[in-house]
Image: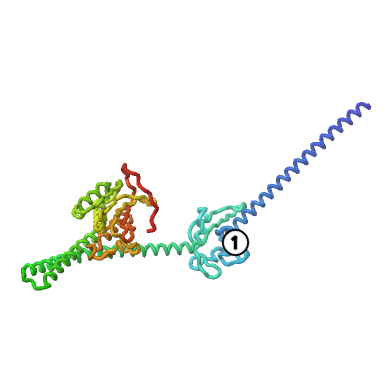
Amino acid sequence: MLLIATVLSALVFTIRLRTFRRVEEMRAQDEARQRKLELAIEAVHRSEDRYRDLVENAGVFIGTHDAEGRLLSANRAVLEFLGLSEQGALIGRRVSDFLPREIRAQFDVYVKTVLTKGRAQGLMRVRTRGGEEKIIEYDNSLRSNGLDKPVVRCIGRDVTERLRHDREIKQLNEDLRRRAEELETANRELASFAYSVSHDLRAPLRHIAGFARMLEEGYGGTTPPGATDCLTQIQDGAGRMGSLVDDLLNFSGLGRRELKRSRTDLNALVKIVRDELAIDWKDRSVEWKFQDLPVLDCDSSLLRQVFANLLSNALKYSRTRQPALIEVGRQWIGKECAIFVRDNGVGFNPKYASKLFGVFQRLHRTEEFEGNGVGLAIVQRIVHKHGGRVWAKSGPEQGATFYFTVGGTPHDQPGDPVPVVTAPGS
């Protein structure tokens, strides 16, 4: 019996020990689960705090309203926009209370739309506490609050200033378009007027020169003293005026001409122009230097006129040099390939460079160098018509260099390396 009692006692002890250990294990598991739950709750609270901070400090309007259009929540941006200090003055009120009276009925249409389709977007006029009307751009969607009651989440922003700027920009664009049309019309009328005037001047000039010549021939050798000089000056003046009229016709005609671009080898073009000007330099000591020029997409006949005017000027203003040095080449200026014509002539004062390309603008007296002051204006108009630019660098008695670009990418041909320079200040 003693043995049996001892065995039973040991068995009971073992069972109690195992039960105790199991209870301790379950208590430890419960504590771990409780700790995890507490950590999860803390994480949820932190997430809610972050979300609340995000909503409160967002630069846009965020809020909710129920199916009746009554506000349930609103962030700080909404309160500040409406001029309210606390949510108590906002929660429970209908959104339509803040709309202009004449459009409040539209709010009911909006509510039906968002409840039916689940989303509504658009613009809405809102009146602030101070009575100022603003335009809100909204994007609202239907949500559930977990109690089977529909809640509409609202997100919006004040676009009043943006719309005002858009209207101003639209008006400015319209004004610009109208001014551009007026300018285009004025340019056409001016070009037509210049062409008509220049064309109509030709006949009177021919008459003046013709009658002066008839008077000179009619008097024969009995011309009164001083009359011969007067008649000569009349004929010379008529000749210069005729040349000026021709230049004006060419200048005005450029405005009506359309560009006909084609791939043009400038090497061949500039040598053709040089040969056409042979009468101006064959009996002079002139040294020509041609760098390897690119092939460009341009109007070859117009660019031929550019080279003709620039080379003619180079020959004219270097006639006092022995020898005259004229160089044609190219230089990279930034990402532009500029063509230049350089001479060792008399040059000009750089402070008057801005006047070079104006019509009838001359930096030298006619008694020194003939001309009408139209050639460089024609160069500029042709270059601008190609989308390029033209400028010049010089100094008194230091020669002159004229640069121009015509837009587009050059099609390089094999040749000598092309020098690279920094962009000028002009």
Residue 305: horizontal and vertical position, in percent? Answer: 24, 54
Around disc 1, counting alpha carbons within 10 Å, would you say few (fewer than 14), some (14 to 19), or many (20 or more)?
Answer: many
Is the residue 141 above or below the residue 3 in the image?
A: below
Q: Quadrant of the C terminus?
A: bottom left
Q: Nearer the viewer, residue 374 or 132?
A: 374
Secondary-structure class at tag 1: helix
Of all residues shown, which one is farthest toward the front?
Answer: 322
Three-letter residue code for mark 1? Arg
Residue 107: horizontal and vertical position, in percent? Answer: 51, 62
| In this rendering, position of residue 204 left or right of residue 364 | left
Of all residues shown, which one is farthest toward the right?
Answer: 2
Q: Quadrant of the N terminus?
A: top right
Residue 410: horizontal and vertical position, in percent? Answer: 33, 47
Q: Nearer the viewer, residue 369 or 194?
A: 369
- According to the picture, the residue beneath numbered tag 1 turns out to be 76
Rendered image quadrant of residue 302: bottom left
Residue appearing at x 36%, y 65% in the figure: 175
Residue 144: horizontal and vertical position, in percent? Answer: 59, 52
From where the camera sits, is residue 257 visible? no
Rendered image quadrant of residue 349: bottom left
